[in-house]
């Protein structure tokens, strides 16, 4: 059995290498760039009017004759003579020998003649070529997580595909003879299987899309064979159940038999003590306890950060905050506790129902209080460390 | 032209009514319950062992004979006689006439005989029927946003489908003759169209999935007809471009012609002044400015909260914080400013490149500084209001 700190330290040393995939830009929301992106064009690509108005060559003139119109999208580069102006609209091409745009509110127009009411400064209201970015300049750095603005920005440069950190392919393998599929009538001695759908949702919420759900009976050979199959096709394997020391807990043996290297087994924590973590080639395996609340806690604390790190994210851990406890907490277990809690402003309250089988409490909680193994008592008003759960 | 506050006040008064849809639980992550959910079963449904160990009837006895085995999933309810015990595993059915489970570490076993080393209290290590929830009890309230724990919890009750607030169906209608699809060679006077992919990503990041992208030329009849089509099939229509006062801005006229009620047009803000908001039956229309950064700002401030509210979410607005400005800000415009900024800890800095055409700055920013229309100067060290942008 190892400490929570030691277990986290081991997890943090992985992965040793990263892989990438090429994706369409429109499917890249929240993905992380695996390459520096250099602009293939000048942006704007031509001198653009920033206003609806009139373009002309700056001079002493206060009166111009409108000779042409340049609307957004027009590709014609008019040649203006002295005293001539072009009617122009926002985003439209400014003729090469015009240098100033006046907004339409600042002229008086009669037929094809405009009279300037308020002369702008020379070069006004023209967006220069490459004002936003020049061709060949660094647009976005490797490691940038793409939000909607970044996606829009790259699309505006004409980019359609990019290289990103590969999002892990995950299998969720659920064991347990007692587990019955929701939607059927419950038989005596059995319960509905909920860990697969819960873990699937937890994976989706961090952007994992390629998820395979596998249900296996508590049978050594079935478990061993299904593990073997997934090891070669997935990046992460989450196993639920079968990792305690009961006579029907075959998972550890099946993993070792499949030559998955054991990196740790059993963590000095509550819930989640029987957590197992291992690795074979570039596939990582978390064998999570079967109890739903334990499984979810182990997912948040250990699996989620590794999944996010493989995906190239920089902030992989759920946010920790120090707040004031509204509850007395006794810890005679000698273990690190993760307690489902409700955080509000600067204080936090332990919720009723901490049993590792109870998801109800989790559904209502927005934080986990962490009590380290050496702390035996927290009084009301003491500072406690809290992990904020995302939603 | 109305103030930002007035515009927000109008948006906040909608929607007047809500609709629901029935979805599979496994597709319900982050959706909001439209119904109270009552438990269809007791959870646990039978008395469960909380340990791997032995079940027996509490007595003065220190020695028991193992007569049966109850493993998780077994449905047989053994009848125990005085002095008999059942070998039992975590999650397994506790026989009706046993009342105590001892963990395996607290007995000495020789063949089929166990000798108690440390007697637990009576009723120990047994999870009672309905300990988590009883049949007919309220499981989750209408209005609960479903995280992974809530989904797991409902699955554990055997639930497979639920009623949720309907996620809006959205059309993004992009106008502009200057716009060219990324992936083709750029012609003179034209730019790549990026607002549709940007708005699509912004919608996806708040859970909207049903999104139709429509591109239309700056032609009054085309715009009018496409608006007509989408009004009857979508809940929200986001229009990009064509809403200024240029001669080729047909959007407002096309909306009015389609009997979309104008709720406001033009907001005293920078960027995003020409924003238009209207409603026809239960469809809401935002006509956003065509400049990418203006469009995204209007989306964040006005469209996103309405979309989230229709989806049943309670926290619809991006989080506002008051922090210290690291930049001098002058506001002689008389308008409310939304400035792209970088927030770090307790201070915020205005980024270079605030032009409404520039998405680059947005891609690097994590906050918008709000400067109200009456504030003319913010000094370094002054407190400013900031909107945190999600990622």
Image: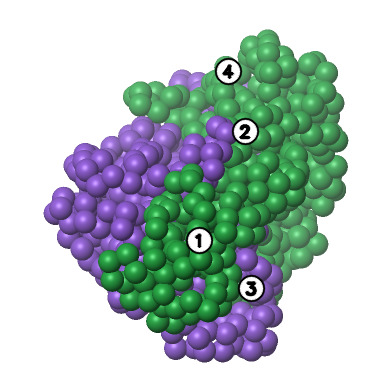
Chain colours: A green, B purple
In the displayed structure, B105 sits above or below A345; it is above
Q: Is residue A196 left or right of residue B150?
A: right
Please tell me which of labels 4 and 2 falls first in the chain.
Answer: 2
Query: Is there a contact, CB below 8 Å, between mark 1 and mark 2?
Result: no
Q: What subunit carries mark 1?
A: A
- Image disc number at residue A161: 2
- Image disc number at residue B350: 3
- Image disc number at residue A216: 4
Crowdedness near tag 2: few (<14), some (14–19) or many (≥20) residues, C-alpha within 10 Å:
some
Q: Is residue B78 left or right of residue A33?
A: left
Relative image position of residue B191 (x, y in whole percent): 52, 46
How many discs appear? 4
Is the residue at mark 4 from the same chain as the one at mark 3? no
Viewer-nearest of labels 1 and 2? 1
Q: CA distance from mark 3 to mark 1?
A: 42 Å
| Residue position for label 1 | A81
Q: Residue furthest front?
A: A82
Query: Is there a contact, CB below 8 Å, between mark 1 and mark 4?
Result: no
Query: Is there a contact, CB below 8 Å, between mark 4 and mark 2?
Result: no
Q: CA distance from mark 1 to mark 2?
A: 44 Å
Q: CA distance from mark 4 to mark 3?
A: 55 Å
Crowdedness near tag 3: few (<14), some (14–19) or many (≥20) residues, C-alpha within 10 Å:
many
Crowdedness near tag 1: few (<14), some (14–19) or many (≥20) residues, C-alpha within 10 Å:
few
Camera-side residue of B4 and A96: A96
Is the residue at mark 4 from the same chain as the one at mark 2? yes
Helix, strand or loop status at disc 1 = loop
Residue B329 location, quadrant: bottom right
Camera-side residue of A246 and B242: B242
- Residue A372 visible, this orientation: yes
Q: What subunit carries mark 4?
A: A
> Which residue is rendered at x = 57% and y = 34% of the image?
B185
């Amino acid at each position: 059995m190892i400490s929570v700190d030691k277990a986290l330290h081991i997890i943090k040393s992985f992965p040793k290498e990263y892989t990438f995939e090429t994706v369409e830009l429109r499917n890249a929301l929240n993905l992380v760039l695996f390459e520096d992106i250099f602009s293939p064009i000048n942006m704007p690509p031509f001198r653009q009017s920033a206003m609806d108005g009139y373009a002309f060559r700056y001079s002493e003139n206060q009166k111009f004759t409108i000779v042409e119109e340049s609307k957004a999208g027009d590709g014609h580069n008019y040649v203006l003579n002295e005293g001539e102006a072009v009617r122009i609209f926002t985003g439209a091409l400014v003729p090469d020998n015009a240098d100033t745009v006046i907004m339409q509110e600042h002229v008086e127009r009669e037929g094809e003649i405009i009279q300037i009411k308020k002369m702008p400064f020379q070069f006004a209201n023209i967006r220069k070529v490459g004002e936003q970015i020049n061709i060949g300049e660094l647009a976005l750095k490797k490691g940038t997580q793409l939000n909607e603005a970044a996606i829009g920005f790259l699309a505006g440069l004409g980019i359609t595909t990019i290289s990103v950190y590969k999002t892990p392919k995950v299998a969720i393998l659920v064991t347990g003879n007692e587990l019955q599929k929701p939607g059927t009538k419950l038989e005596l001695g059995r319960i509905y299987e909920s860990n697969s759908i819960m873990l699937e949702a937890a994976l989706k919420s961090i952007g994992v899309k390629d998820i395979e759900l596998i249900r296996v009976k508590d049978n050594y050979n079935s478990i061993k064979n299904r593990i073997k199959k997934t090891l070669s096709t997935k990046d992460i394997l989450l196993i639920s159940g079968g990792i305690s020391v009961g006579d029907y807990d075959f998972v550890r043996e099946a993993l070792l038999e499949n030559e998955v290297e054991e990196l740790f087994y059993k963590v000095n924590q509550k819930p989640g003590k029987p957590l197992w973590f291992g690795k074979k080639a570039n596939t990582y395996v978390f064998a999570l306890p079967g109890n739903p609340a334990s499984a979810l806690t182990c997912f948040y604390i250990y699996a989620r950060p590794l999944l996010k790190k493989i995906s190239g994210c920089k902030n992989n851990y759920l946010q920790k905050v120090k707040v004031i406890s509204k509850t007395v907490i006794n810890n005679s277990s000698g273990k690190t506790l993760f307690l489902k809690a409700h955080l509000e402003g600067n204080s936090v309250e332990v919720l009723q129902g901490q049993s590792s089988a109870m998801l109800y409490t989790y559904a209502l909680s927005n934080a986990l209080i962490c009590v380290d193994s050496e702390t035996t008592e927290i009084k009301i008003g003491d500072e406690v460390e809290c992990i904020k759960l995302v939603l």
